[in-house]
Image (spheres, rainbow, N blue to C red):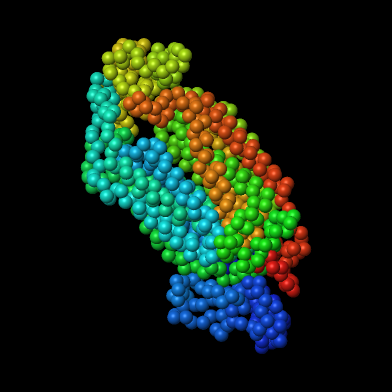
Amino acid sequence: MAMPQNSTRENGFCFAQPLDFCRPSPGPGEACGPLGAMAGRDGGSPALGNGIASSGAASPSDSCAEPLCAPTPAEEETPLQGGVKYVSAEGEELACGWGGFTPGCLQLCNTSKGVLFFLCVASFLQGMTVNGFINTVITSIERRFDLRSYQSGLIASSYDIAACVCLTFVSYFGGNGHKPRWLGWGVLVMGLGSLLFALPHFTTGHYEARSAAEVGVCGGNQSLPCSQAASALSGYRFVFMLGQFLHGMGATPLYTLGVTYLDENVKTNYSPVYIAVFYTAAILGPAAGYLVGGMFLNIYTEIGRETDIAPENTLWVGAWWIGFLGAGAASLLISIPILGYPQRLPGSQRYIVMRVSEAHQLKDGSHKKASDPDFGKTVKDLPRSVLLLLKNPTFIFLCLAGATEATLIAGMSTFGPKFLESQFSLSASEAATFFGYLVVPAGGGGTFLGGFLVNKFKLRCSGIIKLCLLCTVSSLLAIFIFFIHCPNMPMAGVTQMYDGSALPGGHLNLTAACNAQCGCLQETYSPVCGTDDIMYYSPCHAGCRRVSENLRNGKKVYHECSCVDRARLPGFGKAEAGKCTSSCAKKPLLLCFMFVVILFTFLSSIPALTATLRCVSDRQRSFALGIQWIVVRTLGGIPGPIAFGSMIDKSCLLWQDQCGEQGSCYVYQNSAMSQYTLVAGLVYKVLGTTFFVVACLLYKPPPPESAPGSSDASENGTSDLQEHKPSLPAEEDI
């Protein structure tokens, strides 16, 4: 990706020659440096250092971009216990380190790219743990600790609950405080949450699973205990909930303060690219979590102990806890360098003072209150901060648009694998892997491409909102693909009678003359595919009496199935464990358009985030992101899976029977599932399109004369800085 040449050494580029704002022949009393103090011999000229005027002699701390010029020992670098000391115009420490320990070698990482690397690792670990490992191992945890589905749902929701509780506090006070310290402590808390999540494995006894090789065949032991006392192990759900709560607390600063810290320390038109890379790492994390977590689940949870059950067995519990131990340790390690970063990176002031404000202009001019350097430092300013954001219609409608997109993303990520599993007759693991292969290039590529487009075309706030609108309309058109669907694979007793005729009145009838003597239970769901290409509820319902193993693929093969191949002589039928393979001709078309929907949905994410940062005052950026995350989680992330789940459940054909109680859905009607998915997708996409249109129409950019120059230096790719203007408006201070 070819980028315009940047002249900041901090961002990995070098000056062709120093940018000097001093007079050609500086006198002894002048400070010379890029964007340095512009004090005259009489000491009366204004200084450009964090936007603060100085009337005294030049100070060694007046330079705001020290690494861009060769520093003099007396002015820029002073040894401090074997370390390096950078200070801003406010006497602010700009060296990377911990307290007084600031060794010179660490300053190589004291750049925006260094920050980006460590934040990417943190977001990768967060995505891998919360959105990868948790979703992968939740079934194993339910089995190991005797949890019900609603209890595991509470475990998953604890993350969002913690985030909503902490967002206002963290974004408001962290946004006006030392962001890297908030970020570092957040990652550390997240690591402690992962270690706590793995703790129950070490505080419980050994897991013992009974062998059940012959259960399920006709004539086998079909008894299943229904009245089981509540297990004491279910109490560990509170430990898991606390671990998830710590995950939510720790990740809160990452996607609010982390984004604004990156935005403040790079050029304006490079900011979307940095944020896109950051979010791409967060999207790749869950993919890694699915792959690595799936590998660990093939290892028996009691490492070193032998068992006679295989991973395909419903009683198998894999080593769910290993991933959390590794992620927790990695989070603790990565928090250390993040804690060492300064409040601002050396040289970042040049971007702050040259930034052109694009904040939405309120009619009463109250948006100027946020430019006060003392605004937002006390709790008293919290209601005023909230009021300023509520009076910003562009911000409000961007939040609502983000909530609709978040609803689709949350619903798709939760039920996308289930949709593929039902449409293409896949196993749960195959569907999850398939969906991962679909989401990684579409989601990750769309996220990065969105930031790249904003940078490539140097879009301003109104242009960014129009790009979001274009992406939303494109995905809205592509979502009509859900008009088509793959037909259900025939299943005896569920989609048709055992003799191939239609079910009377659509009612289930799993019992037929061929399996009436087998005593089959509906609680034992283990689908098999007969040689007649018809699925059966279980080997027992297929009338199978013997079982062997296929040495070629390791699957169980059932013999003497009286319900299979009924046209032949009795006893000749065979069936193989698992679902029948679908030969749906519409599969490539469905996958192609699903890719387009996911691509354009994620393509608008970084532009929408960038527009949010641009339409509010600089001092409110972190707080605005916090409020936006609350809206997105409350209206989108939390209810999204519930809304999608309730609609998809309407298409269920076969429910699990747990001793008379309804459990999860086993078989869906594919046509109904596609229709309900289409309805949900259309509703939210139309709402999102409407919100982006309103945000675009109501956005009121600042007048051109409010900017420090005729155009922002970061908006052209040929030079970093324009000619120095004699003064800067107070709104540009941070």
Total labels: the figure holds: 0
Estimate the x, y position of residue 362 in percent, counting from the top left: 72, 55
Q: Residue furthest front?
A: 380
Can residue 668 be seen here? The reply is yes
Estimate the x, y position of residue 490 in percent, counting from the top left: 44, 20
188 left or right, relative to 65:
left
Name the image quarter holding residue 349: bottom right
11 left or right, relative to 21:
left
Work out whether residue 507 or residue 8 is closer to the camera in this orientation and state it.
507
Q: Residue at x 62, y 38 (%)?
A: 685
Quarter of the image that includes the N terminus: bottom right
Please, is residue 678 above or below residue 337 in the view? above
Name the image quarter holding residue 261: bottom right
Q: Residue at x 47, y 80 (%)?
A: 80
Work out whether residue 726 or residue 529 is closer to the camera in this orientation and state it.
726
Q: Residue at x 50, y 64 (%)?
A: 180
Can residue 17 be seen here? The reply is no
Q: Residue at x 55, y 59 (%)?
A: 172
Estimate the x, y position of residue 487 in percent, counting from the top left: 50, 23
Quarter of the image that includes the C terminus: bottom right
Please, is residue 113 above or below residue 394 in the view? below
